[in-house]
Amino acid sequence: MTCHKPSTTQPEQHGSLTKPMLAGGAIALILIAIFLLSAGESNPEWPKLWKIKLLVIVPLAGAMGSVFYYLIHHLSSIGLNNTIAV
């Protein structure tokens, strides 16, 4: 007769949220910087520091996108399925 241990499955351990946020923000910053450097002259009617706003907002959006992906991936790894009961 064999004795079976009850299986204790634990969800996959994820690392810190900081790394994905930095990666998403860095990728967004690099892409927007390349775009802005290749854009050339801007419209003279626009404010002088309009590029600064883009260099702040776009990396923040990239970081928030990475947080969203991290959380969705974490939820799917603990067993929550994307099914809808009809």
Image: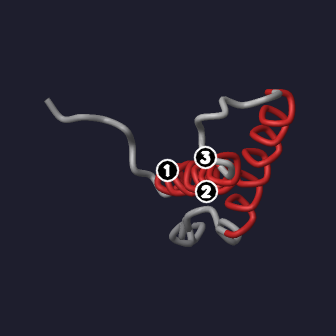
Label 3 is placed on what type of residue? Answer: Pro
Answer yes or no: do the residues labelled 2 and 1 have beta carbons within 8 Å? no
Q: Is residue 74 above or below residue 34?
A: below
Q: CA distance from mark 3 to mark 1?
A: 38 Å
Residue placed at 57% from the left, 50% from the top? 61
Residue placed at 81% from the left, 42% from the top? 33
Q: Is residue 45 above or below residue 78?
A: above
Is disc 2 placed on a helix, strand or loop? helix
Which mark sits nearer the N-terminus, 2 or 1? 2
Q: Which residue is mark 2?
A: 60
Foreground tag (2 vs 1): 2
Q: Is residue 18 left or right of residue 75?
A: right
Q: Quadrant of the N terminus?
A: bottom right
Query: x, y (%) of residue 44?
Result: 66, 33
Answer yes or no: do the residues labelled 3 and 1 have beta carbons within 8 Å? no
Q: CA distance from mark 2 to mark 1?
A: 18 Å
The residue furthest left is: 86
Residue 30 image-quadrant placement: top right
Q: Is residue 10 left or right of residue 22?
A: left
The colour style of the image is: secondary structure
Using the image as rendered, state which of residue 40 and residue 27 is in the foreground.
40
Disc number placed over residue 44 in the picture, else none: none
The residue furthest front is: 44
Q: CA distance from mark 3 to mark 2?
A: 21 Å
Which mark sits nearer the N-terminus, 3 or 1? 3
Disc number placed over residue 72 in the picture, else none: 1
Is disc 3 placed on a helix, strand or loop? loop
Foreground tag (3 vs 1): 3
Q: Which residue is mark 3?
A: 47
Query: x, y (%) of residue 38?
Result: 86, 28
Is disc 1 placed on a helix, strand or loop? helix
Q: Is residue 78 left or right of residue 80?
A: right
